[in-house]
Amino acid sequence: MERSPGPSRERVLLVDDDAKVLTAEVRSLGERFRIDTAASGDEALDLVRRTDYAVVVSDLKMPGMDGIRFLTRVRELRPDTVRMVLTGFATRDNAIDAVNDGYVFRFLTKPCPTTALRTAIEAGVAQFRLIRDQAELQGLRKVHRAMAGIIQGFTSLVEARDPYTAGHQRKVTALSLAMARHMGCDEDTLNGLGMAAMVHDIGKLYVPAEFLNKPGKLTEAEFSIIKSHPKVGFDILDPVDFPWPISRIVLQHHERVDGSGYPQGLAGAQILPEARILAVADVVDAIQSHRPYRPGRGRAAALEEIREGRGALYDPGAVAACLAVVDQVDVDAGPTFITQPRGSGDAGRADEEEA
């Protein structure tokens, strides 16, 4: 076996029983590709079992295992590897066999100009990358579907413990995504934001149900426990290797741009953009929704809250986006609750209402 370093991260395997041919090919191609060589099909198969090659180029007539059998075995062992033939014994029949049995990408004949061989291998590497990219995309789609199912399961579990906020996370998600689209966020950001919004209250699994469903005003101690839910949510989600900062978005969705929020007292750009969007959507739905300690106060009160807090409590861009899209999003899905204006004796400040 002869190995030659090169700039391409993918490896190429050249198989030929003529040592002079291999030496010439390594000399002409080694600066472009990372090349391994083998003098027989059996030797080459040992390499294929151990190494993930992008392209395998094989002669047909070799002692022991011939090229057709070898390439057929490569297809079985490494179906993504692009297979090519380079032979001095080209016939119609072996060309058909190479295509039908070895599923070859190129069939080249000797003598083959260096430029033609290099071009063919470059095309093979490109084909290998395309195959891998498609496989990775399919894998990511499966992962995303699995994540969505897990997220939905967590959402249902949270809402089952707190019937007064049933549908809250779903409605906050719809509004958050509409706002983010209006703000020009890309699809990847939308995916991460949507996942985070669906589980932004997952930390309430830690909060005793009697606190969540208490009909009267919460004590300071009870409200302090409820306020721990962003950190608990972070602790639950952070070990999961999401492709988005979901745990940090959940952690920060009660932060405020002036630093008055919780749990970390972050301000301005210290807060993730997705968390700033989620914070506004959360407040709007929370103020509209009925809670055990106070009835919902309606959309007008919710929008007045974010207008008054724009630039101080809430991100101005997120507020503007919410005001622009809120009438187009069905954030009022579900029962209609009695509303009342906020008075001095109301059970909750804005932060308590959305906790």
Image (cartoon, helix red, strand yellow):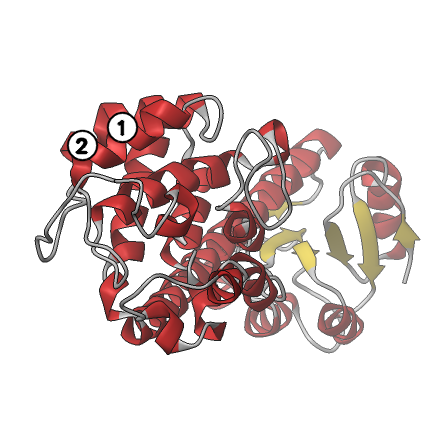
Nearer to us in this view, 19 or 89: 19
Nearer to us in this view, 260 or 254: 260
Q: Which residue is mark 2?
A: 300
| Pointer 2 local density, CA inside 10 Å: few below 14, some 14–19, many at least 20 | few
In this rendering, the answer to whether 149 lies above or below 90 is: below
Asked if marks 1 and 2 touch (Cβ < 8 Å), the reply is yes
Nearer to us in this view, 25 or 253: 253
As helix, strand or loop, the secondary structure at mark 1 comes to: helix
Q: Measuring from the top left, give residue 8's x and y in whole percent.
A: 76, 41
Q: Residue furthest front?
A: 345
Circle 1: residue type: Glu
The quadrant of the rendering that contains the C terminus is: bottom left
Q: Residue at x 27, y 28 (%)?
A: 304
Q: Measuring from the top left, give residue 100's x and y in whole percent.
A: 43, 64
Res 182 quadrant in image:
top left
The residues tagged by marks 1 and 2 sit, at their Cα atoms, a distance apart of 6 Å
Side (left or right) of 306 relative to 324: right
Q: Tell me if I can see residue 184 in this picture.
A: no
Side (left or right) of 133 relative to 178: right
Circle 2: residue type: Ala
As helix, strand or loop, the secondary structure at mark 2 comes to: helix
Q: Tell me if I can see residue 282 in this picture.
A: yes
Q: Which mark is residue 271?
A: none
Res 180 quadrant in image:
top left
Q: Measuring from the top left, give residue 28's x and y in whole percent.
A: 84, 36
Q: Residue at x 74, y 52 (%)?
A: 12
Q: Which mark is residue 304?
A: 1
| Pointer 1 local density, CA inside 10 Å: few below 14, some 14–19, many at least 20 | few
Q: Residue at x 19, y 43 (%)?
A: 297
